[in-house]
Amino acid sequence: MSAPAQPTACVIIIGNEILSGRTKDENLPYLAKRLGQLGIPVKEALVIPDVETRIIDAVNDARSRFTYVFTTGGIGPTHDDITAASVATAFGLNVEVHPEAKRILEHYYGETANPARMRMAMVPHGAELIANPVSAAPGFRLGNVHVLAGVPRIMQAMFEGLAHTLSGGDPVLSRAVSAEAREGDIAEALEAIQAEHPNVDIGSYPFGLGERIGVCIVGRSTNRADLDTAMDKVSRIFQALGLDPSESDPAATN
Amino acid sequence: MSAPAQPTACVIIIGNEILSGRTKDENLPYLAKRLGQLGIPVKEALVIPDVETRIIDAVNDARSRFTYVFTTGGIGPTHDDITAASVATAFGLNVEVHPEAKRILEHYYGETANPARMRMAMVPHGAELIANPVSAAPGFRLGNVHVLAGVPRIMQAMFEGLAHTLSGGDPVLSRAVSAEAREGDIAEALEAIQAEHPNVDIGSYPFGLGERIGVCIVGRSTNRADLDTAMDKVSRIFQALGLDPSESDPAATN
């Protein structure tokens, strides 16, 4: 539903802890919202283990199919942090000590700058550092692949530092209309609106919050006028059922 | 690190709302934990939009690479619910009215059983229904692919109803040891333990909770003795640094 020139993004979440259920990923929701605002909608996300061959395959597949790729996780000092070396291999490159990364880490760690920590100065040949204002150890960009930390606070700081380097398209606008209806009562009318507005993505999401049960219709488009026309029609579906729709999304995360 | 006969799982999360950041996925953490307990570790997860070609490709790729595939989302009554038809196409099949699903939906909806709702009785030819004790509309199993609802409460009820049909391997056991150390201080010793215990997956996860900053080491294995030997060594790393490790994971979700 995007204009042909709309850039796209893929997020690759690297980490056994997500696949075991130990950790709930918070990085995809953050990147999805921020990239959408920048006009770079996330079209796919992948969660893979800390396994070299899987990282190589996933990175090579994603960098050929999407404008931008963002990886999270696996760039710390321990044996399970294999993202940098795996991304290098994906590009047919070796990792090497980046002089600026070395300087940053030596300054940050001082006397505790042991070999494990200095391993975080190794990035693929030709990679550009991504600053880490929280805990020093940098991420890096190689081609269209951005390698970020897994800890959400660090990942977010890295992303905000690099966001200005991305070439976005038109921001993806959204509007939500909710009412205490059931999906099946409006499905037919909603399908007609979607057919009339192919450049608005219309999603239907039931919610049940305590006593309040209903459905939230979310429209997304890069065209404000089209979005408003379509969503005004959605409001009128609810009104025709005698309901009082609200311009809100009770089930959305912040 | 699994024994060769260990079955594997892939989770395919279908829904624009996850990729836009509107909704935080809760289904992967749930399935990952439960499948791990059943000895069917989740090895990969994918988040894809409500786009037929992407669903077809993802399902066909996953069903050939993993023992079990679970999809979530896209089986409701609205125009954006295209999972059933897309999975049918992935298998080269058509959807058709399943008599039992039709009966269930007619009973549940009574006079409000309109065409949009009855569309939820359409499943691929030969599919077996997965019961939905929450809101009637069933999921289905086709080959090794299990098609579940996206609403977490419904997804969980569907999964618990089908769990007994899965052939699990040895349960994946885990043990966590935490201390107020920094990853870089223990990385070298930890790598040595990982090398000595190749059938224990050892992950290192820093945490910062208020005043308390530290690292949690999580071991996972299907072998209790190996797991205990490895994790006892991890405790001793911390003790050698004068720290008091605890058998807990302060950063884990419930």
Image (tube, coloured by chain):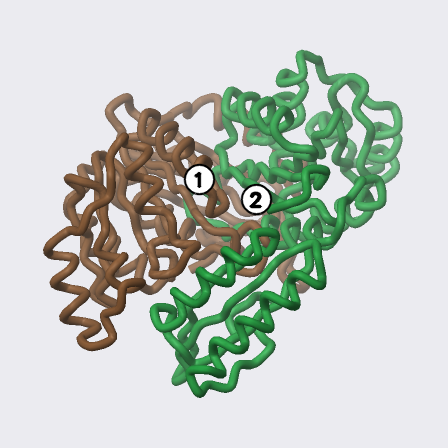
Chain colours: A green, B brown
Q: Is residue B240 left or right of residue B128?
A: right
On residue B45, which mark appears?
Answer: 1
Q: Amino acid at mark 2?
A: Tyr
| Residue assigned mark 2 | B205
Residue sitting nearer the eye, A24 or B185: A24
Q: Residue at x 32, y 57 (%)?
A: B155
Q: CA distance from mark 2 to mark 1?
A: 20 Å
Chain label for disc 2: B
Residue sitting nearer the eye, B108 or A34: B108
| Label 2–label 1 contact, CB within 8 A | no
Q: How many marks?
A: 2
For residue A162, what is the image quadrant?
top right
Establish if B106 lies above or below B58. below
Establish if B45 lies above or below A83. below
Residue A168 position within the rendered picture, expressed as x and y whole percent measured from the top left: 77, 44
Residue B5 position within the rendered picture, expressed as x and y whole percent measured from the top left: 24, 24
Q: Residues within 10 Å of mark 2 (few under 14, many from 20)?
A: many
Q: Is residue B215 left or right of residue B235?
A: right
